[in-house]
Image (tube, grey):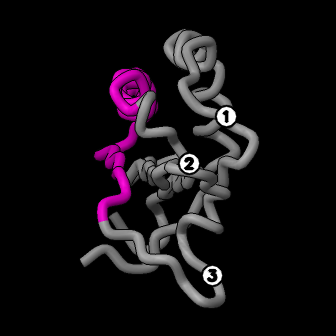
Amino acid sequence: MALGTRYIDGIILPVSPATKEAYVAMTRTVSATFTKIGAIRVVETWGSDVPAGKTTDYASAGHAAGDDVVSILGSNGRPSPPDAGMPKIMAAARMQTARADLTFDGKPMIYGDFTTLLDA
């Protein structure tokens, strides 16, 4: 694909370690929806070495509290722009099920769509 034609969805959120297994199950549902809509790849991460910063850091950016771990999801390569793909993703039946089974508080979630500048 030419430069700037792929879109990346990025999400940062805090998740309690006590709900990690349920969260992973929910992310499988979400990733199936993203790939059905056109994502080439979906990556979900779990913070393993996320140091506290003096000015800012992932924990404060993700509004992590207590023993929360910052989780980051990215879907890679969706060919349609955010205004075309995201409404389809959010309306999918799988996403309705995932929303009903949320294992985390979605209020502090940070999300956005990004246009690819470099894919090396």
Task: Work out whether mark 2 precedes mark 3 in sequence or the reverse, and give the earlier one.
Answer: 2
Q: Is residue 90 positioned above or below 93 on the image?
A: below
Seen as rendered, the residue at the extreme left is 120
Disc 3/disc 1 C-alpha distance (Å): 21 Å
* Lower position in the chain sequence, tag 3 or tag 1: 3
Which residue is rendered at x = 43% and y = 76% of the image?
51
Q: Answer with left or right where residue 65 lies relative to residue 1.
A: right
Tag 2–tag 1 contact (CB < 8 Å) = yes
Residue under pointer 2: 14
Tell which of 38 and 64 is nearer to you.
64
Q: Amino acid at mark 2?
A: Pro
Q: Quadrant of the C terminus?
A: bottom left
The three-letter code of the residue at mark 3 reads Thr
In this figure, which residue is indicated by the disc labeled 1?
105
Which residue is denoted by mark 3 in the rendering? 56
Q: Gap in Å between the C-alphas at discs 2 and 1?
A: 8 Å
Give the side of residue 58 with respect to residue 74, left or right.
right
Q: Residue 35 magenta-drawn?
A: yes
Q: Which residues are magenta?
A: 20-48
Circle 3/circle 1 CB separation < 8 Å:
no
In the image, what residue type sits under mark 1?
Answer: Asp
Confirm whether residue 28 shows in the render.
yes
The image quarter containing residue 113 is bottom right
Q: Residue at x 62, y 12 (%)?
A: 100
Picture residue at 66% right of the left edge, 54% below the top: 110
Q: Is residue 31 visible?
A: no
Q: Quadrant of the N terminus?
A: bottom left
- Residue 47 is covered by the magenta coloring: yes
Circle 2 packing at 10 Å, graded few (<14), some (14-19), many (20+), is: many
Q: Position of residue 59 (x, y in %)?
A: 56, 65
